[in-house]
């Protein structure tokens, strides 16, 4: 099974990179996918369709793993940040004061960007990126077409990448002084 998956390794890296926008994280995500599928006991038949790799299956696994992996300390902290109207708690022993200051600055930039949006867009952004609801959950709950929500989320992601990409890279690389 792993041999079959490895034949399309570069494709998996490109897919993961499109989600993470970071080469190292994309490589890690793909390697974690291999390990996960192996641990789950997936067979060649599980990952193939008509004797070729089932790209949709692998894409789904990568997307799910990416969504799970982005729930790191930054995103958990993001859920209780000022975007939801709460103060950031800086008493975490795991975090440095410099990291907290950089995080506060990033969240204020996100809040500044989203404050210019229409209420519908702000709510969709919060539901998807902050509360972690799936596109399907949002579509069912709001009675809005899935395609419409997908296009909106794609647009939000591009806006944030455009506006904050350098700062986010610095944050994840722990170069907090470049943000402040």
Image (cartoon, grey):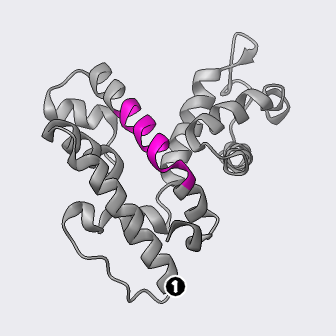
Residue closest to the eye, 48 or 139 = 139
Rendering quarter of residue 80: bottom left
Count of numbered badges drawn on the protein: 1
In this view, 9 is above or below 132: above
Is residue 142 left or right of 102 when viewed as pictured? left
Q: Position of residue 99 (x, y in %)?
A: 50, 77
In this view, 32 is above or below 7: below
Q: Position of residue 14 (x, y in %)?
A: 69, 31
Rendering quarter of residue 45: top right
Residue closest to the eye, 15 or 89 = 89
Residue closest to the eye, 116 or 18 = 116
Rendering quarter of residue 18: top right
Q: Is residue 156 magenta?
A: yes
Looking at the rendering, the stretch of residues picked out in magenta corresponds to: 153-166
Tell me what residue is drawn at x 34 percent, y 54 percent. Answer: 110
Q: Quadrant of the N terminus?
A: top right
In this view, 166 is above or below 74: above
Q: Position of residue 138 (x, y in %)?
A: 24, 36
In this view, 74 is above or below 143: below
The reply to whether residue 171 is in sight is: yes
Tell me what residue is drawn at x 57 percent, y 52 percent. Answer: 166
Of helix, strand and loop, which mostly describes the magenta segment?
helix
Task: Give the residue at mark 1.
Answer: 96
Tell me what residue is drawn at x 30 percent, y 68 percent. Answer: 81
Q: Position of residue 103 (x, y in %)?
A: 43, 69
Is residue 82 left or right of 143 when viewed as pictured? right
SS for dot 1: loop
Q: Is residue 40 magenta?
A: no
């Amino acid at each position: 099974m792993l041999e079959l998956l490895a034949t399309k390794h570069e494709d998996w890296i490109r897919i993961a990179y499109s989600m993470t926008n970071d080469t190292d994280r994309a490589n890690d995500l793909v390697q974690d996918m291999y390990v996960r599928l192996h641990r789950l006991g997936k067979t060649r038949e599980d990952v193939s369709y008509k004797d070729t790799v089932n790209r949709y299956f692998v894409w789904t696994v990568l997307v799910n793993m990416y969504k799970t992996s982005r729930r790191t300390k930054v995103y958990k902290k993001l859920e209780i940040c000022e975007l939801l109207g709460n103060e950031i708690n800086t008493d975490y022993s795991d975090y440095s004061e410099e990291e907290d200051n950089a995080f506060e600055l990033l969240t204020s930039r996100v809040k500044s960007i989203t404050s210019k949006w229409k209420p519908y867009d702000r709510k969709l952004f919060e539901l998807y990126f902050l509360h972690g609801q799936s596109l399907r959950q949002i579509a069912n709950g709001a009675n809005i077409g899935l395609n419409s929500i997908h296009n909106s989320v794609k647009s939000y992601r591009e806006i944030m990448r455009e506006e904050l990409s350098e700062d986010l890279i610095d944050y994840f690389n722990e170069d907090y002084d470049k943000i402040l």
